[in-house]
Image (cartoon, rainbow, N blue to C red):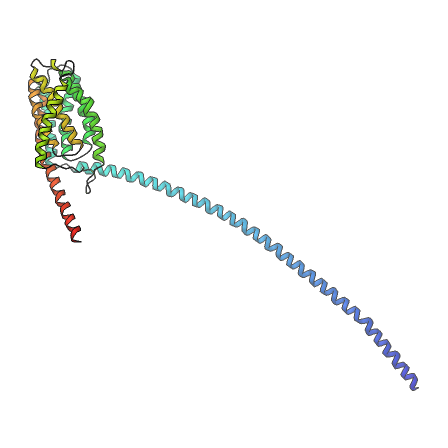
């Protein structure tokens, strides 16, 4: 019995061992299957995540590209609008400057200057109405109109010179040089007429741009002017006379120049007036106060010539311009002395600093 029990026990153990051995591979197979499934699931999850992240990146990139396009378009629009605004502002500033400059110019006229111009206009009007036969020794209506325009424009131009305004040269070209050349040709003063066209129009243009380069530091519509020393003034007067006689003589060599007037003296006087006027133009170009000397001498000689030729309406111009010549000379002198004092004070302050 004991042996049987022992045998049974050993067979049972052997069975248990077999069953255990047979059961072990099954659990390991299950575990390995589970592991494989979990790994594949993890891989799928990773791949899905990667795919989704790639899609998100692509979406983000497309969104960024669209945003950049929108930003670029908005920046372009903003830049264009800013540029348009700047152009409009520049145009408005230019217009405002022009308007302000014109308004300043109109406001710069003093009561004396307004009365002066109105007096000239009234005198010319009265002369034209009540003494039309004494205006010029001609029946040509166009020439009479040119003389009226010249009579009014001359004082206006000279007043603008006294105000140191560069636009006097443009007024001179349009309303004086052209009209006076027509007037002088009709009167037979050929040398003066030729000088008006050949000399005065070019020098007025050059003077306008030269004056434009020297605006006053305080007032832009005013041009800086200067003067010479007293001994240089004497030399200038002598030079004006010498220039007048020399160039005047050359002008008499023009064919027909000495046949304008019956008396030879007035032919030479005509040429001398032209030469002194040229000296005035040169001094005016370089902005020297001494140009008033030449201008005053020209007016005196013009008065003599107008009386001789019977151009009495032009005496209004001579009288008005002589008054303004004295006024302009004094006004320029005050301006020059004031600026010299300011320069001395500035230099003194710089030395103390």
Q: Quarter of the image holding residue 143?
A: top left
- Screen quadrant of the N terminus: bottom right
Q: Residue furthest bottom?
A: 2
Left of 161 or right of it: where is 37?
Answer: right
In the image shown, does 164 or 32 lie closer to the viewer? 164
Residue 349 screen position, x and y as percent = 16, 51
Residue 26 at x, y percent in the picture: 79, 68
9 and 286: which one is in front? 286
The answer to whether one can see residue 132 in this image is no
Residue at 25% over, 39% down = 97
Does residue 17 sit above or below 343 in this rendering? below
The residue sitting at 22% across, 38% down in the picture is 101
Closest to the observer: 290 or 329? Answer: 290
Total tally of numbered discs in the picture: 0
- The answer to whether residue 240 is seen in the rendering is yes
> Could you say where residue 43 lies in the image, as x and y percent from the top left?
67, 59
Above or below: residue 345 compared with residue 326: below
For residue 4, which quarter of the picture?
bottom right
Q: Can you tell which quarter of the image residue 336 is in? A: top left
Residue 251 in the image: x percent, y percent? 14, 19
- Who's the residue at 51% across and 47% down the image? 66
Q: Residue at position x 86%, y 76% from top?
A: 15
């Amino acid at each position: 019995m004991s042996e049987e029990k022992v045998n049974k026990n050993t067979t049972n153990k052997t069975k248990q061992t077999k069953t255990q051995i047979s059961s072990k591979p099954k659990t390991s197979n299950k575990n390995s299957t589970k592991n494989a499934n979990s790994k594949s699931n993890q891989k799928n999850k990773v791949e899905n995540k990667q795919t989704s992240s790639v899609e998100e990146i692509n979406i983000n990139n497309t969104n960024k590209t669209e945003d950049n396009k929108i930003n670029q378009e908005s920046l372009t629009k903003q830049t264009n609008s800013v540029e348009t605004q700047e152009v409009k502002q520049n145009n408005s500033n230019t217009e405002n400057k022009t308007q302000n400059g014109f308004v300043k110019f109109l406001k710069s006229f003093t009561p004396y200057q307004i009365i002066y111009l109105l007096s000239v206009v009234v005198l010319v009007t009265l002369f034209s109405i009540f003494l039309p036969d004494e205006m010029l020794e001609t029946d040509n209506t166009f020439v009479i109109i040119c003389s009226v325009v010249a009579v009014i424009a001359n004082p206006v131009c000279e007043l603008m010179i006294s105000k140191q305004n560069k636009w006097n040269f443009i007024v001179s070209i349009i309303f004086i040089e052209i009209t006076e050349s027509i007037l002088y040709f009709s009167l037979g003063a050929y040398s003066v007429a030729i000088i008006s066209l050949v000399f005065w129009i070019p020098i007025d243009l050059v003077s306008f741009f030269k004056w434009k380069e020297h605006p006053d530091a305080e007032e832009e519509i005013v041009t800086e002017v200067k003067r010479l020393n007293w001994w240089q003034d004497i030399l200038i007067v002598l030079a004006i006379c010498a220039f007048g006689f020399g160039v005047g003589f050359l002008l008499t060599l023009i064919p027909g120049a000495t046949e304008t007037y019956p008396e030879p003296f007035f032919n030479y006087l005509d040429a001398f007036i032209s030469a002194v006027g040229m000296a005035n133009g040169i001094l005016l170009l370089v902005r020297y106060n001494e140009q008033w000397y030449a201008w005053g001498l020209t007016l005196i000689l013009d008065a003599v010539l107008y009386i001789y030729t019977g151009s009495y309406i032009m005496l209004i111009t001579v009288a008005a311009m002589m008054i303004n010549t004295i006024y302009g000379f004094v006004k320029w002198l005050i301006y020059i002395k004031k600026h010299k004092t300011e320069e001395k004070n500035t230099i003194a302050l710089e030395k103390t600093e």
